[in-house]
Image (tube, rainbow, N blue to C red):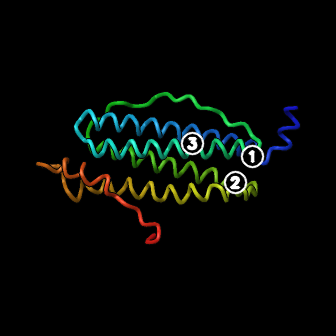
Amino acid sequence: MKDLMRIKCLISSEIENLLNQQIKKEAHSSAIYLAMASWCNRNGYDYSSEYFFKQSDEERYHQLKLYKYVLDMGATAISPEITNVKNEYDSFRGVFEEALDQEVAITQSFKNIYSSCLREQDFVTMEFLNWFMKEQREEEYKARRALELFEVIGEEGTGQWEIDKHVNKIKYDSEAS
């Protein structure tokens, strides 16, 4: 029966494995953003806390979108175990630096999956991944803009308070890109 199911699966074992790895990365990202939200909340950065709660929700949505796709393709989606989530950060700015690093790593991971799909001529999965590629462009943009606030506003005096207030106002205009 297992061999019959594999034959009827619409994606290769390699793509299935890569997508399951991505599911885990998205779940890990969601947990990281929850930890960042908690850190910001404990340190009085309420708007940034809310920003990271939203980011966590988005990453969980991405995880579920991938999970359902794997299932829809007749493959096995694996519910990931999440470990090694950092809960303490050295600085307010450091939280945003790590958020940008996280988004860049996720984008690279999607590029690797896309590249494997191209090699296998898995055009259906490539089309599915186009949504994520566009989404990552937005995620990286927002993470960079948030980090730029530290340069534009500065951290002296009430700078961190001002940065915190402006984080939730960052918008991405897909038409302008």
* x and y, in percent, of residue 63 in the image: 57, 42
Q: Residues within 10 Å of mark 1 (few under 14, many from 20)?
A: some
* x and y, in percent, of residue 119 in the image: 72, 56
Distance between the alpha carbons at the discs numbered 2 and 3:
15 Å
Q: Residues within 10 Å of mark 3 (few under 14, many from 20)?
A: many
Residue at point 83% right, 39% down?
6
Residue at point 62% right, 32% down?
79
SS of the residue under disc 1: loop
Task: Name the outermost residue toward the left.
Answer: 157
| CB-based contact (under 8 Å), mark 2 and mark 1 | yes
SS of the residue under disc 3: helix
Distance between the alpha carbons at the discs numbered 2 and 1:
9 Å
In the image: residue 166, left or right of residue 115:
left
In the image: residue 4, left or right of residue 173:
right
Q: Identity of the amino acid at label 1?
A: Met
Circle 2 residue: 125
Task: Name the outermost residue toward the bottom.
Answer: 176
- Figure label count: 3
Circle 1 residue: 73
Q: Earlier in the sequence, mark 1 or mark 3?
A: 3
Q: Identity of the amino acid at label 2?
A: Thr
* x and y, in percent, of residue 137 in the image: 48, 59
In the image: residue 114, left or right of residue 153:
right
Circle 3 residue: 63
Q: Earlier in the sequence, mark 2 or mark 1?
A: 1
Residue at point 52% right, 37% down?
27
